[in-house]
Image (cartoon, grey):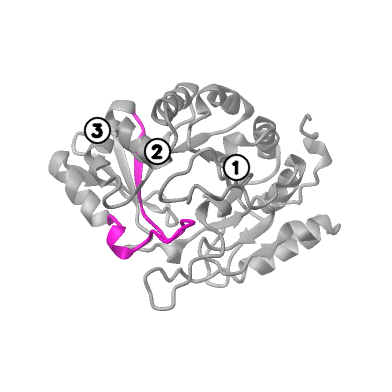
Amino acid sequence: MAAPSFSAIPVPAPHPPLTDSHGRVIHDLRVSITDRCNYKCVYCRTGEVGAQYPELAIEEYLRLIAVFVGLGITKVRLTGGEPLLRRGLVDLVRELSRLRTLDCDPLDLALTTNGHLLESLAQPLKDAGLDRVTVSMDAVDASTFERITRVEGSFSKVLAGVRAARAAGLTPLKINCVLLRGFNDDQIEGFARFAREENVVVRFIEFMPLEEGRLWTPEIVVTLREIVDRIGRALPLVELPPREASETARRYTFADGVGEIGIIAPVSQAFCGACSRVRLTSDGKIRTCLFSQVEHDLYGRLRAGAGDEELRAYIVRTIQEKEARHHIGEPGFLKPSRSMVHIGG
């Protein structure tokens, strides 16, 4: 079914910055458009649980995202699950790109994917208006990669997708690697070389307790300091200044200026004080933090007939409840009710 005309979706006038009760400006919206995934990565899924939550219609995502943009959101990232599994994705991107014609701040459109289906979709997504892609890729060795994803032939598919995205101009192209001690921490130096050879930004992410099972322990986390030290012994690094206060990654280049490495360290060096994000799940619930214990049913209000002003007011009230920080590793810490695949990256 063709995507609806954007003219049918009311978009409110620009709004003052969306600010939480801690003074943080919220300008980054992560939208999961499915919790289905074609991989069964060992650090994410048990391999036994599939999709658990319904998906909204494409026009419903458009309506809700447009309301967020009217509240000052300037970055929209489509996630999953695996968003390339979602029928109508290219149409959704095309319609979202039309938000740039409105009297709003410039809108950055990005997508996070495991890359398995990216080779054939990279150019259509770019043509539809997508700016950037981040590919989740947890090893540069094929056998290690396929042991993690539990899908035969996955490495060659993802590598082809990475190269197609780069050729299509979906840049800067970022590669996200979640590191787990004893699983793929032997890939660190290889990823440093990969960043230089493939002209991509490799970002290592400390493993967080967001998996379906009970794999996480502090001991399995490979910290920022260890990553920097190990890469630095092979290829000297120079730290780069942050581009904005809410940037999640500490950024490094190599001493010769070729290539970039980022490290996202929510466990060892939490960045909650500058958080600018809010998430919308595939079934239309607002999550104000990855580790929220409460969800806020925005879609339920849309389904009940709420107008845009009512939706705006609900979002503003919800943002006021955004948590000050997460409590990973502290006594009494509780994992969220959903795992990462069912929240959205």
Q: Position of residue 75 (x, y in %)?
A: 56, 47
Residue furthest right as drawn: 305
Q: Nearer the viewer, mark 3 or mark 2?
A: 2
Q: Earlier in the sequence, mark 3 or mark 1?
A: 1
Asked whether the beta carbons under mark 1 and mark 2 sit within 8 Å of each other, the answer is no
Type of amino acid under label 1: Leu
Q: How far apart are labels 3 and 2 at the CA level?
A: 14 Å
245 is higher (above) or lower (below) than 185: below
Type of amino acid under label 3: Arg
Question: Closer to the camera, 185 or 295?
Answer: 185
Residue position for label 1: 107
130 is higher (above) or lower (below) than 72: above
Question: Closer to the camera, 98 or 299?
Answer: 299
Q: Position of residue 119 (x, y in %)?
A: 50, 24
Residue position for label 2: 137
Type of amino acid under label 2: Met
